Image (cartoon, helix red, strand yellow):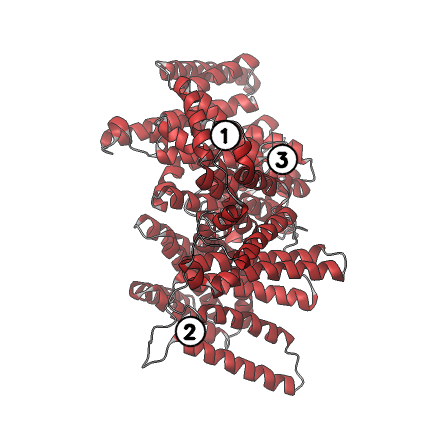
Amino acid sequence: MSHGVNASEVAELEAPSTPQANPEHGLPENFGGGILGSLLFWIAIAFSTFQIITAFGIPLDRPFFSNITLIYLIGAALVAWAGWLAFSAMKGHRVIDGVLALVALAAVYGLILKFPGSLPSQVVRALHVGFLCLVAGAMLANHRAGNSASRAIGWIIGFAGFGVGLYHWALYDELVIRAGELTQGDFIVGVTAIAILFYLVWRVMGPALPIVAGLFLAYCLFGNYLPAPFDHRGYSLDQVIEHMSFGTEGLYATPTLVSATYIFLFILFGAFLERAGMIQLFTDVAMGLFGSAKGGPAKVAVFSSALMGTISGSGVANVVSTGQFTIPLMKRFGYRAEFAGGVEATASMGGQIMPPVMGAVAFIMAETIGVPYVEIVKAAIIPAILYYASAFLAVHLEAGRSGLMGLPKAELPSAGRALRDKWHLILPLAVLVYLLFSGYTPLFAGSVGLALTVVLILAGALALGLVSETVRLVFWVGLGLLAAAFLWAGVTLVLVLVAILVLLSLFVRGGPETLEACRDALADGARQALPVGLACAVVGIVIGTMTLTGIGTIFGNWVVSIGKDSLIASLVLTMFVSLILGMGIPTIPNYIITSSLAAPALLTLDVPLIVSHMFVFYFGIMADLTPPVALAAFAAAPIAKASGFRIGFAALRIALPGFVIPYMAVYDPALMMQAVGPYADGGPAFWLKVAYMVVKAGLAVVLWGAASVGYLHGKMPWWERIIAVAAAASLVLALPITDEIGFGLAILVLGLHFWRTRRTAKPAIG
């Protein structure tokens, strides 16, 4: 049967309603009303401004004309702004928003002024966490406070958390000199930092992560009373607080560093691209390419989510953004509500392993194991393609089984026209990929990508005033060459280009609105960073416990002892640890905890470094699809108007082939393009091995998918499905002659299936 939707319904679906709250933290996608909402809005912008300045490494104290520095120019601009506000107030104009903006940005100026050359890493980390606490406390106060008293308490907690960051900022030199010696003031600040973070994470993200971190903290204090081998020598409260709240082993460990640099920058990158219209471009391209195919709407969901994954590393954010359009379209087209939600949840969670902008975990992984980010990207490419191929296949087979055809081409947008109209939006992504694969750091690549995105948004407003298509083309080409020339001279000059475009935008039609969109993107980026940043800070407790007590080594030795008898048992144990932890905590802390415990053990069992960490990462993602606590499924539930549990089980069935890919990579690392063993030279033999693994894994995915859905070229009887599962399992196992058995069974079941379905179809045609 065929289900169709007309053009007006498609247009209606393309304008989705805004969800009530973000499923990652349960807070609305705004800052609240009134003066407190405006204050929080400008604090968020100040937060993003601080992160941009520190991430870009702009030398504010370097003279660029005579003895004039950027510090002096910015200070003069702030003074002039204050004078203009005073003049406007005397004229009787409303200036409250301007005053709030000035105070927030002047505070950032003050923070930078103490270290105008470059802020120390410890100060950046502490202020990053301080800003997160302030924004989170204020968000809770503005949205969840039932009365004035609780609202005041929320703001006080937020400012107290920010005060901890200020303590590190103000006493940085003194803290460095007396590192390891805790004063009474240090002790109070350290305890306050831990208490505030635990409270805020509990209120924003639920109790699971604070409970897990609390157990590790309790182990530091009371683990000496446990029996061997789980005991340790014992640590005083002062030692634990010093280790966790100062230095770079606890709250301000590597995850917080990565959150304060790479992650925040790429969140802003995604926020600006969304404001520029990238989501609409992805949707139009996906609709144009696959909307008319069999089961078109579901294929649109998979493809658009894969494209979204290239700029956004948050699976839940992908569900909320693309799912608002794709899930209702799939339902209206004839797909069951739980299947539609499962498709979107599965496709969106894959965004975390889809290069070039993978999930935040990828940046943490690169920093933790000390490899370039591009190596993580290389390892993820083939598994990501196979993951989306399995999802694509599942919806194709489901459409065939249910007889769901595509939309009429006349009612669909043109992919070619969408690319012609908005091709320039792909440029920042293309530059990002080029820089990453050219050996530049993610921080530099992200900075350039963000700067170019802002350039494109601002230039777009200027281009609207150019009537002639030729003139417009010359304008874009000239701007591109200018940006490239500035980039060659240095990223700071690209920011000069941004400043020039900002000034020009003030005087062209549509320019002020574009500047407002950029301003809003800055605020959105700070708000979207909350769940990631808070999780990175609290999970530092786990890292601190590992480094202080050595519990990771104890667990690792246990996994190694199991692996001596059976590597598969160690892998299954690691998978279950990831899945169980992932049922209660987000992917980032899940990866950090499990990789700290199990990845070193897998490395000892001769699993390559990147593969062992990717194995943990992969199942941390799959945990968000695994009931009973499947965050991505429950994010899709209100959109699909179906049970989160049903969506979770549907997503699990769709993603089932994805569970086997990490196991295949462990037994044959060529699937993640890791040249080890006899292929360590990376020569032609290695690339032949990679091609062989892609074919083998692809065939396994097809067989798993067909057996799961019960349909290939036609409906599959139970015995065909059993043979298909046996063939796929044989291809996954890395034992003598299992590949031969797998290929033989695959040829048998595919041959029988196609012969049988063609034979049955002939009488019907006749």
| Residues at marks 1 and 2 touching, judged by CB atoms closer than 8 Å | no
Marks 1 and 3: CB-CB under 8 Å?
A: no
What amino acid is at disc 3? Val
Q: Quadrant of residue 521?
A: bottom right
Name the amino acid, label 1: Phe
Q: Residue at x 47, y 46 (%)?
A: 360
How far apart marks 1 and 3 lie (CA) works out to 30 Å
Residue 509 visible to an observer of this rendering? yes
- Say if residue 31 shows up in the picture: no
Q: Earlier in the sequence, mark 1 or mark 2?
A: 1
Residue 523 position within the rendered picture, expressed as x and y whole percent measured from the top left: 56, 61
* Residue position marked by numbered label 2 in the rendering: 500
Residue 629, disc? 3
Locate residue 550: give its quadrant.
top left
Q: Quadrant of the C terminus?
A: top right
Give the percent coordinates (x, y) of residue 68. 36, 80
